[in-house]
Amino acid sequence: MKKIRLLLVDDEPDFLTAYARRFKRRNVEITEAQSGQQAIDRVREGEFDVAILDVMMPEMNGLETLRRIKAIKPDLPVIILTGHADSGVLIEGMDMGAFDFLLKPVGTDELYFKVLDAVRSRRRGQP
Amino acid sequence: MKTALKTLFHFIHGNPEGKREAVEKFLNKSEEFRLLLAANGKALELMAEMTEAARSGHPSGITRVRAFSVMVASSVRQMIERLCRMAPGRYDALREVFNAIVQDMDQAFAGPPKGPLGPTVVRMADLRAIDLLETGSKVAMLGEIKAELGAVVPRGFAITASGFRLFMESTGLDDEINRLIQIHDGNSLEELTDLARSIRQAIDLAPMPEELETAVREQCARLGDVRLAVRSSALGEDSEQAGFAGQFATRLGVKPAQVTDAYREVVSSMYSATAMTYVRNRGLREDGMVMAAGCMEMINAVAGGVIYTRPPVGGDSDAVIVNAVPGLPCAVVDGSSMADSYSVDRETGRIRSRDIAEKEIRFILTSGGKVRKEKLYGGRELEPAVPDRDIERLAALALRIEEHFGHPQDIEWAKDRDGLIVILQCRPLTVCEDAPGPRSKPWSDDEESRGLAILSGCIPASPGAAAGYVVKVETEEDMFRFPDGAVLLARNARPQLSALLPRAAALVAEFGSSVGHLANVAREYAIPALIGAPGAVERLSGVGVITVNGSNGTIYLGRRKRMIQREARPTARVRTTDVGLALERVLRFITPLTLTDPESTEFRPEGCRSMHDITRFCHEKAVYEMFAQGDRPVSGARRLAGERAMQYWLVDIGGGTSADAGGPANSRRDITIEAVCSSPMRALWYGMMAVPWEGPPPPTMDGFMSVMTSAARNPALAAGVRNDMGERNYFIVGGRYCNLQSRFGFHFCTIEGFAGDDPNVNYALFQFKGGGASMDRRHLRSRLVAEILEKRGFIAEIREDALFARLEGVSRQAVEQAMAVLGYLLMHTRQIDMSMADPGMTVRYRERFEADIERLLEGLPNELREAGCAA
């Protein structure tokens, strides 16, 4: 099966490294971004099947990042993954078209299957 | 998978353009349906966990309550999104209903409203008891006794709750701490230590607000070149509900320039592993913790100690207990030294008895402001720390303080070089009201225990008797390894040990005093404790099970059942905790199910009152949109005819059944399995039917009970909630494609496969979740199924009881074989979780399954050759 191209956006390097390592073993090709702006640049430059997005980031927060990503690639599924149990962010994020909203900590398996769901759902949606 | 679907469509011959679109729409819809079912399962699972936490009375922190609430909301929102995509425009009203309920939920776990910020610091001289909401009771009470009773207290000032809020809010620390608590999932001491480290780091990195820094500097300038004690004075600390005894830091000998650093440390101590353990065990809200601090001039004490205006462990209630040590009083409080102890008559004010201890060390303040430990020698270790008349002065002052507050007090005092008595803190005292009274028989008459005492004459610190394996705790490592229900044996009664007390049967410490922090916490948890048990570590190490009698100060070998019974005290009254209350409040918007009748007029988005209602509504409507709606690519779901097939329905998305399927006589409602020509479906069905199922295995008794309890607990599994459509099992088939959504009792399962000629697009997929037995048995069952599948090339993943397995890039035959295996496992592994109690059972099942599967696969080619419309 084709590799899944995943964009992982988080300002915590430890978090990025840990998930990148676990996902690489699962046929997932990871591109990391450590800020909202970096994420937007990556989305402009490359093709991704799915993005995982943190919310609390300095400078540009996750919701603003999501808004801009959706403006560039409306059909890119974006999974919000955050340490803040904030229902306001949940509602706003889903209204903006996030694929799902998950709270850290999330097991690698659970996140991986969410990624598969997102990828599958998007591919189904295409002609 | 995209190419797989395209290939799938290539196999659907003779479809006019319109029909192909319909097929695609249907596939999209079924994908949304699949995701909706997954979210439904997740939501119900989370609700069940929250209900269980509320029932057990042990929710683990407000952060978890909030996280669970938001996760429920997320799953429910997911269902709404999926449903809205299945039927655009039809259910949009759900979003507003959802938003309104989420708002109610947020209100339910929000803390009390916060007023405007007040002054960040207040001078000690300006403080009164009523200021405790800003300064914590510890500091406010000192202000009160100075103003009202003329007691001498140290000069100084308080950093207020407003100062704390300013620090938290202006730096974003409050959000960050919540986030850290949220992402550190876990309750073990080890995980909490890790969390405490992260929070401490965040606090250290946060800049001190300019306003607070300036205010502190001004106060320090007023005090001159002194050394300060920076003491925790958390809001709620020292209250009768929660003592927090010794949980928080006090920094001694602080130079004026270092006050804010010391304050940081005090704030950090509120999030230490031991403090967090305490907060969680007590059901307090970690987001409600507010740390005020007292910054007070250090008293260069020649002696000091603690006064209890009533004996804390019961006994002679006419006495005031005064403890004294030479040097700074911290040696009494942290249990690092033995103390002189006096009993003073409340009526006459005279000393009734005295016990002068051998005091090995004292703490002194060096000229540089450091606190130093000093060894006592030359007979000084045996001298009383203060003369008798000081003891009587102290008792008299203590009684005035008790009278003023109208409650027994725990008072820390110091005597300075000029002989002045200074009160360092006072707080309400936890007294064991139901301490055992005088006994009819002296202890020596106890027949059961006679001759079994291994240590006697220890100082009772918390009454009652309990037994357990004795475990010595010296290092932090030992703390991590401490087993539940053991007797905690320690050299010193360090306050850090309080984190272990909720799990300990009893406490024995060689050094310390019955008036120290650890003794306080032991009494709060009603754990028998002996503190001041010389030689205990040597005498008790390795003796196995002992019984600790916290009333008579004796330790016995083995478990003295009758003594434990006789000493039994009524268990502490169960209080509904702050966190428990928040959980109950939020559950009112989550779990009640009011939408029960899909036929009623109330069954619409606006009728939803809870998250559970929305899940119910979405599920019902999704099933309707999926299977009962008119606009399907083929005329509709048809029932599989035949004795063993009655509970299965089939939807053909093109090319999955022969043209004359079912024959004209049966109209188009029924279809027989012979008319199915999708090879993955044929293989799957063959696997399901080839070996007759013997029925459910006889469950072991506890397995069965666990089914009953989970059915009773989980509202989604209650009979009234089931709906007919959801109970059905659906095959969705195409020429090379098959998808089965099934539900057997508590088991939810999806099987999907595509078997074409190009291996690159072929796959088989299996998802399986649920079961009635306990989680460990369900997990064992999933493990077993995963092992069997892995042997056949599947990649399998397990999360708790959920199993996901996929096989990809294999030949058509391999997919067909896989489908047959999946069919067999679907039918034969259901309910075996109930009897999966031991490893032997797993082995027997595995052997039988492997043998069945071997035989089954031999017959598969024949079966497929006979298929009515094989290619």
Image (cartoon, coloured by chain):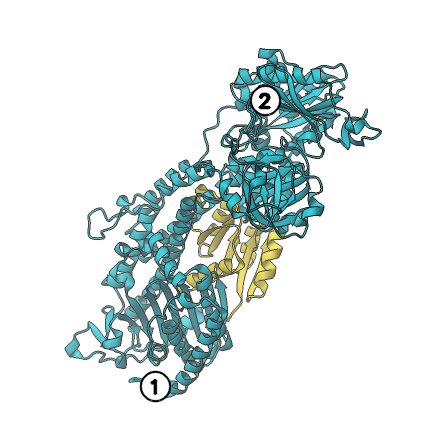
Chain colours: A yellow, B cyan
Kindly identify which numbered label has been placed on residue B287: none
Q: Is residue B780 left or right of residue B417?
A: left
Identified at 50% across, 66% down, the residue is: B797
Residue B771 seen anywhere in this rendered image of the structure = no
Q: Earlier in the sequence, mark 2 or mark 1?
A: 2
Residue A94 seen anywhere in this rendered image of the structure = yes
User: Which residue does the numbered mark 2 point to in the structure image?
Assistant: B319
Q: Residues within 10 Å of mark 1 (few under 14, many from 20)?
A: few
At mark 2, the secondary structure is: strand
Q: Using the rendered view, name the quadrant where residue A31 is placed.
A: bottom right
Q: Nearer the viewer, residue B462 or B44?
A: B462
Q: Amino acid at mark 2?
A: Ala
At mark 1, the secondary structure is: helix
**Marks 2 and 1 close (CB-CB < 8 Å):** no
Kindly identify which numbered label has been placed on residue B863: 1
Q: Using the rendered view, name the quadrant where residue B724 is placed.
A: bottom left
Position of residue B636 relative to residue B473, above or below, is: below
Q: Position of residue A126 (x, y in %)?
A: 41, 63
Position of residue B729 relative to residue B46, above or below, is: below
Chain label for disc 1: B
**Badge nearest the viewer, 2 or 1:** 2
Q: Position of residue B700 (x, y in %)?
A: 40, 65
Position of residue B705 relative to residue B352, above or below, is: below
Position of residue B35 relative to residue B506, above or below, is: below
Q: Position of residue B622 (x, y in %)?
A: 30, 57
Q: Position of residue B171 (x, y in %)?
A: 59, 34
